[in-house]
Amino acid sequence: MMKRSVLWLLSLCLAACTLMAQATPASPPLQLPLTAQKSLLAGHLSMWFDTAGTATWQQARAQTFAPVPGNVNLGYRPGVLWVRMQIQRGENLGGHSPAPDWLLEVPPAFLDEVTLWIEPRVNLAEGQTIVEPPSQVAGAGMHPEQRPLWHRNSVFPVDLPEAGLYTLWLRVASDNIKAVTPVLWHSNALEKNTQIKTMVAGLFYGIFICITLTALILGFTVGTPIFLMCAGFFLLLGLNLFIADGWLGLLLFPGRPQVADTVSTSCMALLSPLFVAIFSRLLRADQFLPRFFTWYVRIVWAAGLVAILILLDGHFEQVAPLVNMLAMVQLVVVVALALWVVPQEASLRWVLLALIPLLLPAMLRLARNAGFDFFINWLDASLLAGITLHAMTLLFFVARHVGQSYKSNLQAKIQVVAGVAQLAEQRDFVALLSHEFRNPIAVLDGALSNLSRQALDTHTSSRVGRMARAVERLKYVLSYCLADERLATLEHAQRVRKPLTAAEIIEESLQQLDDESRRLQLLAADPASQTLLDDAHVLGDLPMLGAALKNLLDNALKYADSGPVQLSVQVQSSQITFIVRDHGPGLDEQASSRLFDKFTRGQQSPYTPGAGLGLHLSRKIVQRHGGEIRVHSASGGGVLAELSLPLIIR
């Protein structure tokens, strides 16, 4: 029941619309006063669209023309459009001479072929046929020297010799019909209007060209890509505007409107991705929506390039509306991005200011080009002014953005240089302290050794032992601090690396080992594994890798008071692993999570000499060689340390 009611309602609405369309009054004739400088024809027009495009004047005259409430606006609907205009010229008053000849201006400039017939109303006898009046032809498809008047739009002289009713028949053939706006002018008024428009347009064009050249020069001198992107954006924007609506299309492509349309629309297809790329960078979209805008810009670039390829294949009428819609979408997306980012980054509000001069006129212009039925007389002028102001503000804010970035980079470089100098000074200070402390510590160590060999009472012997352990720990701290500073220095130096075998690394670590305890056991490999070990090589710095393995052995010997410390080597498909196994108390659970941090020591052996730097240095060395260190508790007690290095693939 509900569906039937909806269908009845739709039928009634359709019938009402049909009756209203049929009841639309015919366009009234334009009463042409003698004193007017300009007569607008909007509201006095009727139209008929020739789908086949083959009708003659006699055939078109016999068709039913539909009244047009304003100017004719078809959007991107290519074909042949017939426009009928009825003009009523009044009688001369007071014996004054008739008004000078009128001129009919038919914008826009890119209409391919425009033909005009002026038919005076005459009383015909029965059976007599209307004689076709002479026609006048103009349009972008004609060379400028063949047109009735040199003008960027089609201009026809309209001779109305006597008072009475005249019918003007206008035939417009184009692949790019958007808005046809006929206007009747007096010759002096049209000339004055043309001069004013040319002067104003020339002023804006000159400013726009200067802005483009400035962006281009800054791009090459400063070396910042965003200036070159702005220069390309301004260049394409200017070409699109000057070819489509200015004199440039007539000068560069006289008599070839299809080529001018293709070039202009191709510029528009490239404008969209450049526009998005520039403003997404200014709005820092890579910080807020990095993946989305990276792919979005790529998709818009791909859409623009595909549109150009289709345009070159001759499908202008299908692609041009899509290109305009694409430009509208990009403008909306960038404005939405600015409105979303600016509340989070107040310093970027100037980017939104650069969009405001372009937003309203561009949206109105693109909407009109897409076929929306409205026309504003000041639209073209406002668009030119808005684009020029947009270019000025955008270049100013881009220069400001680049200047701030350059200043930030300069400050960062100054801070880095100051930090490097301060770090070098600290290292020199540590080296000086270590050198100055060594002699007094050596004297204390010798004196305590002599005291420990003498017969002392229990209390004095205990105190001497505590002093000896403190001096030993101080020696470790100084030696490891120097080692850590040397390693930090070597990170910035280019050390010579060469292929090394496992035996060479083990021999280097044993030579650096201070404790020559017999508890250290080197486990021999079976013959098959030994063959693999002999052929296995790692690329590295021998003293550094020897020091890394030496620290693992030294820790095992120190923290495992008794029992053997075993060293073995295993070779796998892509790495070689040195395994150090002790039978001591195992890992301290509290310190295991911070095992490789600086100055971290276990609580189980508080009197064991050490600085908590051995594993930290070993890990840094191994990571620089692309390897890793793992330390964990072994089954059956003790600690298992594994040092793995990548093999050289031969």
Image (tube, rainbow, N blue to C red):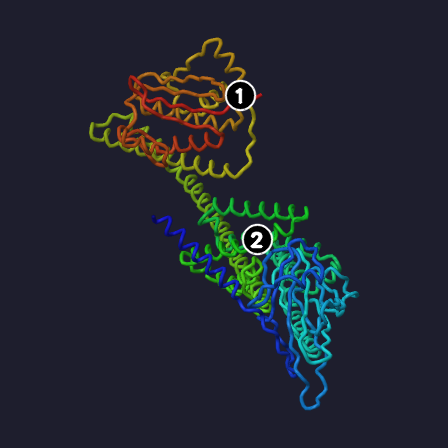
Q: Mark 1 = which residue?
A: 537
* Quadrant housing residue 512: top left
Residue 409 visible in the picture: no
Nearer the observer, 298 or 625: 298
Q: Which residue is painted at 67% across and 53% down in the image?
A: 52
Q: Is residue 284 above or below residue 46?
A: above
Tell me where residue 227 appears, x and y as whole percent: 60, 56
Say what secondary structure mark 2 lies in. Answer: helix
Out of 225 and 48, give the one closest to the viewer: 48
Determine the residue positioned at 40% across, 58% down.
343
Using the image as rendered, state which of residue 225 and residue 508 is in the foreground. 225
Q: Identify which residue is drawn at 33% across, 30% down.
A: 609
Q: Is residue 265 above or below residue 597?
A: below
Decide if residue 363 is in sight here: yes
Asked which secondary structure carries label 1, the reply is loop
Q: Which numbered tag is attached to residue 272? A: 2
Image position of 106 (left or right of 568): right
Real-space CA distance between mark 2 and mark 1, rounded to the nearest whole angstrom: 56 Å
Contact between marks 2 and 1 (CB within 8 A): the answer is no
The percent coordinates of residue 518 (x first, y second) are 37, 16
Kindly give the residue lying farthest to the right in the view shown.
145
Q: Amino acid at mark 2?
A: Ser
**Residue 199 horizontal/vertical position (percent):** 67, 73
Residue at far front of view: 126
Q: Amino acid at mark 1?
A: His
| The C terminus, quarter of image | top right
Seen in the image, is 560 located left or right of residue 522? left
Q: Residue at x 61, y 72 (%)?
A: 41
Q: Quadrant of residue 430?
A: top left
Q: Nearer the viewer, residue 627 or 584?
A: 627
